[in-house]
């Protein structure tokens, strides 16, 4: 069974609702909303941010609000879009978060991790007294940059209040450059938990899953990951790896490429986990 990180599901959910409605595939928006809220285990608010949300004062007034997912276990994810290029929007959001009282941790996320392309955007973490915000930017509509702000509240381990915890900046997540002429779709998203980190992306390409896996596998292996297994067919290509972290932890990696409909659409994922303890003594 594959578990999908809540914030990633929430962002994909909002995109699915918008796309289905625009295509005329949904006659009853309330019915789709009910289905989605069950699947993501949270409340979906289209086109708005709930009153009182700490993120409401961070999103600029000229942003186009796609919506919010309020997760039942705490926290929320806001998806919006701003006009401009990626550097301008990322810096604008960084300043907005700092002005609102959030602070950057001592060790920031690297600029390029996971699946990237010629238009690879950035991720960053900002810390509060009892919570943290993950900022992700990605390509949106023409002329727009999509913003994803994920708020994790108190009671959840964060890279801000537990510096010994392995979070994305501590994991040797490989940088995976898209084939020439392809850009990351679906956000080039990244998520983490106490025992691992995952990056995922979507592509439109005539390349087979085997060809796409071989392209990324060469990059994985050039970044000190040792191959341990291969499984490939016309729909799924999976490769597994091992390596040791800088502090001596055994790590396991998995590269997965899937063609869910056997067509041009390809879903890519790389996950890193450790079976060792994830907290320093």
Image (cartoon, rainbow, N blue to C red):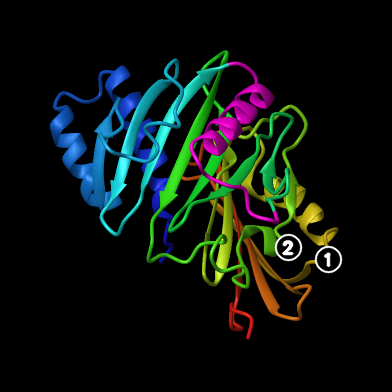
**255 left or right of 99 in image:** right
Give SS at disc 2. loop
Spatial CA distance of label 2 from label 1 is 9 Å
Report the residue at 40% width, 31% height from top.
57
Report the residue at 16% width, 23% height from top.
27
Between residue 115 and residue 146, name the one nearer to us.
Answer: 146
Quarter containing the N terminus: bottom left
Q: Is residue 106 above or below residue 262?
A: below
Report the residue at 35% width, 51% height from top.
75
Between residue 156 and residue 261, name the one nearer to us.
Answer: 156
Q: Nearer the viewer, mark 2 or mark 1?
A: 2
Rendered location of residue 58, percent (x, y): 45, 32
Rendered location of residue 269, percent (x, y): 58, 53
Give SS at disc 1. loop
Q: Which mark is residue 172?
A: 2
**21 left or right of 125 in image:** left
Q: Is residue 37 magenta?
A: no
Q: Is residue 265 visible?
A: no
Q: Is residue 116 above or below residue 279?
A: above
**160 left or right of 26 in image:** right
How many labels, in total? 2
Between residue 148 and residue 98, name the one nearer to us.
Answer: 98
Q: Is residue 76 above or below residue 1?
A: above
**Residue marked by disc 1:** 224
**Other residues around mark 1 within 10 Å, as few (<14) / some (14–19) / many (≥20):** some
Report the residue at 50% width, 31% height from top.
147
The quadrant where residue 79 appears: top left
Q: Are marks 2 and 1 in contact (CB under 8 Å)?
A: yes
Q: Is residue 90 magenta?
A: yes
The boundaries of the magenta stretch are 84-107
Rendered location of residue 45, percent (x, y): 25, 34
């Amino acid at each position: 069974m594959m578990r999908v990180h809540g914030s990633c599901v929430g962002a994909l959910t909002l995109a699915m609702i918008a796309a289905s409605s625009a295509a005329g595939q949904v006659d009853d928006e309330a019915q789709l909303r009910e289905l989605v809220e069950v699947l993501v285990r949270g409340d979906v608010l289209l086109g708005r941010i709930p009153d009182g949300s700490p993120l409401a004062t961070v999103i600029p007034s000229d942003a186009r609000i796609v919506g919010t997912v309020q997760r039942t276990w705490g926290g929320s994810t806001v998806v919006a879009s701003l006009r401009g290029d990626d550097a301008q929007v990322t810096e604008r959001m960084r300043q907005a978060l700092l002005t609102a009282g959030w602070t950057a941790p001592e060790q920031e996320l690297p600029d390029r991790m996971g699946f990237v392309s010629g238009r690879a955007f950035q991720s960053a973490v900002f810390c509060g007294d009892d919570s943290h915000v993950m900022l992700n930017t990605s390509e949106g509509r023409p002329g727009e940059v999509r913003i994803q702000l994920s708020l994790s509240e108190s009671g959840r381990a964060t890279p801000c209040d537990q510096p010994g915890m392995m979070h994305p900046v501590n994991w040797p997540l490989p940088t995976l450059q898209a084939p020439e002429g392809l850009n990351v779709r679906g956000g080039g998203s990244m998520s983490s938990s106490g025992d691992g980190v995952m990056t995922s992306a979507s592509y439109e390409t005539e390349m087979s899953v085997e060809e796409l896996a071989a392209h990324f596998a060469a990059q994985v292996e050039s970044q000190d990951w040792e191959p341990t297994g291969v499984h490939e067919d016309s729909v799924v290509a999976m490769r597994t790896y091992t390596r040791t972290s800088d502090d001596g932890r055994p790590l396991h990696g998995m590269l997965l490429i899937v063609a869910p409909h056997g067509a041009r659409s390809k879903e890519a994922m790389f996950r890193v986990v450790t079976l060792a303890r994830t907290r320093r003594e």
